[in-house]
Image: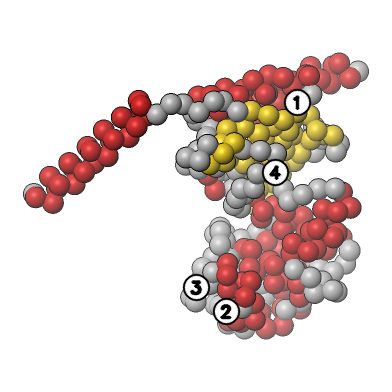
Amino acid sequence: MGFIKVSVCVLVLALVYGCLQRLFTKPLPVVVDGYVHPAFQPVLEKFRENVASGREPGAAFAVYRNGQPLVDVWGGYADVEAARPWRQDTMTQGWSTTKGIAAIVVAVMVDRGWLDYKRPVHEYWPEFKQNGKKNITVEMLLTHQAGLPVLDTPISVLDIREEPERVEKILATQAPVWAPGTQFGYHAITFGPYIDTLVRKADPKRRRMEQIFREEIGEPLGADNWAMNRGFLYYNNSDGNLVFGHPGHGGQIGGADPKASLGFGYVTNHLSIYGVGDDPRYVGLEQIVYKCLKDYDKSEH
């Protein structure tokens, strides 16, 4: 009982401290900047509302159509404690939104004949076929059906950068935890190392993922970094259109709506419990975008 009483007291003190801190801390000014097409002014107002309410400590949101910006806004604070505002060039983590970028890289490589979705991975990476992985295809690896969601030997981001040969060996020797192609299981952490190694093996120049993206996609297009099918998540958005892309942990999302010719991205430094494009902060912005888009299309015609 003594432990429980101490725990309750600590919890109560923490709650009281938090409340007092909010009461006596002067709120930071609401900071929002960026560009919106005049027809999309309500999107900016909604974004400002999210920041002002405190639901959005810091974030950025962008919508492009046919290469032209309709919305490109940012606001709040990159570091609330230091009162450092979120700026146009503020960097943040996109989490699993980068899986969509990886899928685009693979699609480009397939288009150029460097990869084939239906071919076994070991045709590009011979060491991969050991321990029951001989029949895993490129498509299985992309669609989280390979049975490789975990590694028996843990690796870190630092390992990937500084000891790539050791990491490659760990990936190649890992045995699937289910018969490949028979089940689906989200490869949250292993997707990146496996796909990066695959594209490096298949690329004629042996380039890493980020270099291929930059040279084959980013620089030619003037772009910076942005149901599972070949690495993408497909879903119907708030306007009923089929969208493809990939969400990220805590509410981030990047994707495209081919029917409306829209590309969009949302990042935040306040991670929520949402992770499949359903964060209310993002959904509210998306809904207003489509309302504005109808008026925009009418004015353009």
User: Can you identify the residue that label 3 sits on?
Assistant: 154
Which dot, 4 or 3, sits closer to the camera? 4
Label 2 – label 1 distance at C-alpha: 47 Å
Q: Say which amino acid is labelled 1.
A: Val
Residue 295: x and y in percent read 79, 17
Q: Say which amino acid is labelled 2.
A: Ile
How many numbered markers are drawn? 4
Check if mark 1's residue and mark 4's residue have beta carbons within 8 Å. no
User: Can you identify the residue that label 4 sits on?
Assistant: 89
Element at label 2? helix
Which dot, 3 or 1, sits closer to the camera? 1
Q: Say which amino acid is labelled 4.
A: Asp
Residue nearest the viewer, comparing 283 with 242? 283
Q: Residue at x 40, y 29 (%)?
A: 25
Residue 130: x and y in percent read 62, 83
Label 3 vs 1, first from the N-terminus: 1
Whether 188 is drawn above or below 116: the answer is above
Residue nearest the viewer, comparing 60 with 81? 81
Element at label 1? strand
Q: Is residue 183 visible?
A: no
Q: Residue at x 58, y 67 (%)?
A: 157
**Quarter that holds the C terminus:** top right
Label ID, residue 170: 2
Label 2 vs 1, first from the N-terminus: 1
Check if mark 4's residue and mark 2's residue have beta carbons within 8 Å. no
Which dot, 1 or 4, sits closer to the camera? 4
Label 2 – label 3 distance at C-alpha: 9 Å
Left or right: 165 in relation to 9: right
User: Can you identify the residue that label 1 sits on?
Assistant: 36
